[in-house]
Amino acid sequence: MSSSKKILLALLLVFIAVQFIQPARNQSGQALATDITKVYTIPENVQVLFKMACYDCHSNNTNYPWYANLQPGRWWLERHIKAGKEELNFNEFGTYSARRQMSKLRSIENSIEDGTMPLTSYTLIHKDARLTNEEKATIIAWLNETQDSLTLQN
Amino acid sequence: MKNSINSIVSVAIAAIALTACNGGNNNAEESNAASTAVTQTEQQANSAETVAATPINGVVDDYLQLKNALAADNGQEAASAGNELMDALKELGASSLTPEQKQVYDEVQEDAIEHAEHIGMNADNIEHQREHFDIISQDMYDLVKAFDGVQKLYVDYCPMYNDNKGATWLSATEEISNPYLGSAMPTCGEVKEEIN
């Protein structure tokens, strides 16, 4: 066997071996009382957009794509879910203080305006998570409305 | 077969994205070393004034460093000031506070520390640092209002930032030096309020 073949074989074995590493799935299946929809009234069309474009990484329920059954796809996704949930969890929005809720709304708006979310590496594969300009405008309009009404309350 | 080729290609893309995802921070750290030296001399100049070196003044100092760095369009220096501000905020929490101060601190700290941390992580993205600075400035305003013995501060307002939604910041000088628009519009803004 030539050495390049040996290397290929070794890589293949590693590839197969890592398939057995399957961490627990981010799927709680529960509708939480702290969900963002319990904090604000969110129109159905905006909710759908958040679910489609953001919930995989920013909620307790990831809709696992086919590549998550393969390593390192799973590993890659799981890392984003962990980091993403630390920043923002739509299912646990109600646990944030009023101040943090406000500032999260601002951050969501910024991230959509700047086009930094959803992550490009994700929309590369998840084409349905790409937000059109119209969809962005719909979300931002709702965000602005909500922030304005909250500022008035305070 | 077509499917499995697809899978392999996608996995390869994922692997590349994986390594690309966290790459941004390294060069920031190298050039931080240089800018901390500058920051430290500035800090010494600051503390030569009459203000006592209390934890709240440590917070204000770091915030003002951050503001100056943003006004100078210097994301690296803003990042190191952001990190220092994060530490100073934590120190403030560990110091002895009156019940009223503790109440304000508890309300503000989680948010403020998070934004300071993000400013620290985004040395290569000054626009993003400014977005966080906008939010942390509100936290800072509420915080300093709860303390005595803070140096004189000006609350400045620039109506143009963020698509004319406007933003405020705190400054030690009456003269405007805009941290949101930087050298593009250094004097945009006006004093809205004076604290102390």
Image (spheres, grey):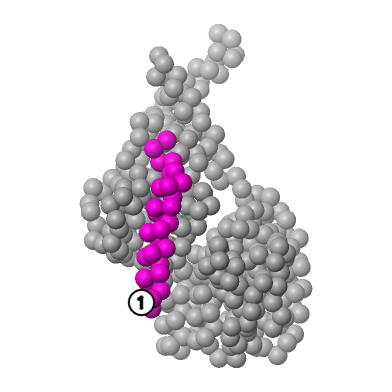
Question: Is residue B67 found inside the magenta-colored segment of the image?
Answer: no
Is B31 rendered above or below residue A118? below
List x then y, in percent, for residue A106: 46, 63
Is B172 rendered above or below residue A146? below
Taking B176 as reference, is A110 left or right?
left
Looking at the rendering, the stretch of residues picked out in magenta corresponds to A127-154
In the depicted view, which residue is nearer to us: A10 or B126? B126
Classified by dominant secondary structure, the portion drawn in magenta counts as helix
* Residue A117 in view in this figure: yes
Residue at 50% in and 41% down: A120
The answer to which image quadrant residue B187 occupies is bottom right
Disc 1 designates what residue? A153
* Residue B80 in view in this figure: no
Count of marks placed on residues: 1
List x then y, in percent, for residue B39: 72, 69
Q: Chain of mark 1?
A: A
| Secondary structure of the residue carrying numbered label 1 | helix
Residue at 65% in and 68% down: B179
List x then y, in percent, for residue B103: 41, 82
Q: Residues within 10 Å of mark 1 (few under 14, many from 20)?
A: few
List x then y, in percent, for residue A151: 41, 74
In the depicted view, which residue is nearer to us: B78 or A43? A43
Three-letter code for the amino acid on which mark 1 is drawn? Gln
The C terminus of chain B lies in which quarter of the figure? bottom right
Question: Is residue A139 found inside the magenta-colored segment of the image?
Answer: yes
Taking A97 as reference, is A121 left or right?
right
